[in-house]
Amino acid sequence: MAAALYTVPALASDQPPLIVQLDGPLGAQFAGYYVADYQGYYDEAEVAVTLIPGTEDVDITPAVAAGIANLVIERMPEALAAREHGADLVNIGQFFARPALEVVCRKDSGVSAPADLRGRRLGLWTDEARVAMLAWLGGQGLADGIEFVDQGHDPSLLIDRRADCISALSWDERAQLVDAGVPPEDLVVLAAADHGPAPLEDGVWIPAKLLESRHTVLSLAGFLYASRRGWSWARKNPVEAVRIVQEYDHDKTLKEKPQVRRMHEVNRLTEGTGGMLDPAAFQATVDLLLAAPGERAITRAPEHAWNHEPAEEAGLDEPE
């Protein structure tokens, strides 16, 4: 058990706190980190952590460049794009080990496979998340022949029949369709990973310079170890995990039932992983992004984009 392997490091008294920028608003997709904070797992690992929720269109690069955050939770394509534009980010952990990318269509659209998307109207995100969908479509040989409709991170295009299909993350837009009362049997879900390579989701990224300090590496190990405990607890206690997230919702906007629905899906993405990045999955994501026709997240292969030292110190290379 990893818990038996990890011991609390002796940290320097002036060790700076970890300011964690999340890549979206407060919700079940970040439950593992909030559980770790609420349950005192970060305190037990002797690491000071501050979690900062983002917005739907948060850009992690300025937060890191300005020193506002020294650790970010970001999807793989966006993080690699930020690296290519000057943010010297390194992945030190990957709790979301499975892709969440989907295309969701109305059953009466006649779409039952990716090839059927030709000639259809597909909602496409207007922010940087769009490049992941474009890369996957390119990998399916669907670089053209689809009519794209601008889409936000909501399913309104499908509900209002302004598109035949929408871009989706399994825990987000598809969950919103259920929230809106659309029967699952009225939908066709094309999970990207069921049809070839699909990009990885949220990972733990830091500025490379933090790895130069042994004390900081140990602090990062403490963060990863405690976060893994948080995600493990959330998988075993999904309803209670959502209630913990709600404790941080000062505006009281999060409703329990929809968030529990998201929690179950997020737990599927984290299940069975120790939290260490799989180099093969990383390379598959890179290859997919590089091969994308037209608009790309990256144009050259990233070098030194991940480092396992903090995860190994935390015992994340051992099964739970």
Image (spheres, grey):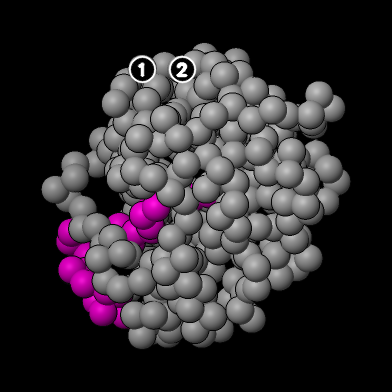
Residue under label 1, please give it. 240
Q: Which residues are magenta?
A: 93-119
- Please report the residue visible at 64 percent of the width from the left and 81 percent of the height from the top: 300
- In percent of width and height, residue 314 lies at 52, 39
Residue that label 2 marks: 244
Report if residue 5 is visible in the image. Answer: yes
Secondary structure state at the residue bearing disc 1:
helix
* Numbered disc 2: secondary structure: helix
Residue 88 lies in what quarter of the image? bottom right
Residue 228, image x, y percentages: 45, 35
**Residue 249 visible in this rendered orientation of the protein:** no
Magenta stretch holds residue 289: no
Which residue type does callout 1 highlight?
A: Glu
Mark 2 residue type? Ile
Closer to the camera, 91 or 221?
221
Up/down of 199 relative to 158, above or below: below
How would you rate the neighbour count of disc 1 (Cα within 10 Å): few for under 14, some for 14-19, many for 20 or more?
some
Q: Which mark is residue 299?
A: none
